[in-house]
Amino acid sequence: MLAPESKQLLLVLDAEVLCSALMCKAVDIPDLLDRASQRSDKLHSLSNMLALELESDLPAIGRVTMPRPAMCHTSSLLTPNDKEQALQVSESTLMSLARSLLKAWQYPVGVLSNSANLLPHQSKASISNKLQELQEHSRNLEDGLDVLSGKMGPTAQILSTLPYRGGSDLGQDKMSKLINFNFLLSCLRRDSHKIDSFLKVLRCRAANMQPNLC
């Protein structure tokens, strides 16, 4: 469970970064994108921090046997590979991609959060707290993007189905739990980076910035 002061901090951040559905409808797109980019930046920062923390304690055999990125449940979604490619994609399509990736992590993030306290890891309590915070950021970002997509037209509201088929059990033995947890977290880090990158490109375009400054 999050400490009371941590919950208070999250509430303050939520008020600053996102807004209620009614308030958001009155805010223009550039401002909403700026707020969403702040949230996605935090989301990626947390996933990256967690992945690095877990990777450092993964035995060499675990690194060798861990599934490749192509096995991530979101790998079937075709996305830009870099900023230059993202700049060639329409705003509505970028929003659709960001929302599809984010919604594809609703259940898997819960699996990570519920499994954290069962990890054979000395920092499992800290990992669990970070994942709860990440879940909160993800929910609030999803709410904000739902409002944004409604302002950007039908294409932005299209969602690709990316089912997670891994189940809630990450393994019976210690090594399996560590390997599967690390793999799922590595997929989350990759996708949170994509979401953050797409939203930053959208924010840049909305502000009419030069492409080289995006």
Image (cartoon, rainbow, N blue to C red):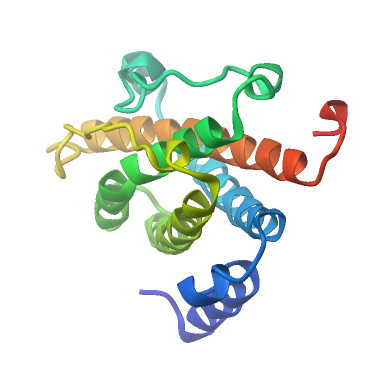
> The N terminus lies in which quarter of the figure?
bottom left
The foreground one among 137 and 15 is 15
Residue at (48, 79) in percent of width and height? 7
Asked if 151 appears above or below 7 in the picture, the reply is above
Q: Position of residue 15 (x, y in %)?
A: 59, 77
Q: Position of residue 49 (x, y in %)?
A: 57, 45
Residue at (12, 38) in percent of width and height? 172
Asked if 34 appears above or below 157 in the picture, the reply is below
> The C terminus lies in which quarter of the figure?
top right
Count of numbered marks: 0
Residue 80 located left or right of residue 99: right
Residue at (41, 37) in percent of width and height? 101
The foreground one among 151 and 98 is 151
* Outermost residue to the front: 153
Can residue 198 be seen here? The reply is yes
Give the image quarter of residue 125: bottom left
Q: Position of residue 212 (x, y in %)?
A: 86, 26
Can residue 55 be seen here? The reply is no
Q: Position of residue 99 (x, y in %)?
A: 43, 42
Residue 92 located left or right of residue 187: right
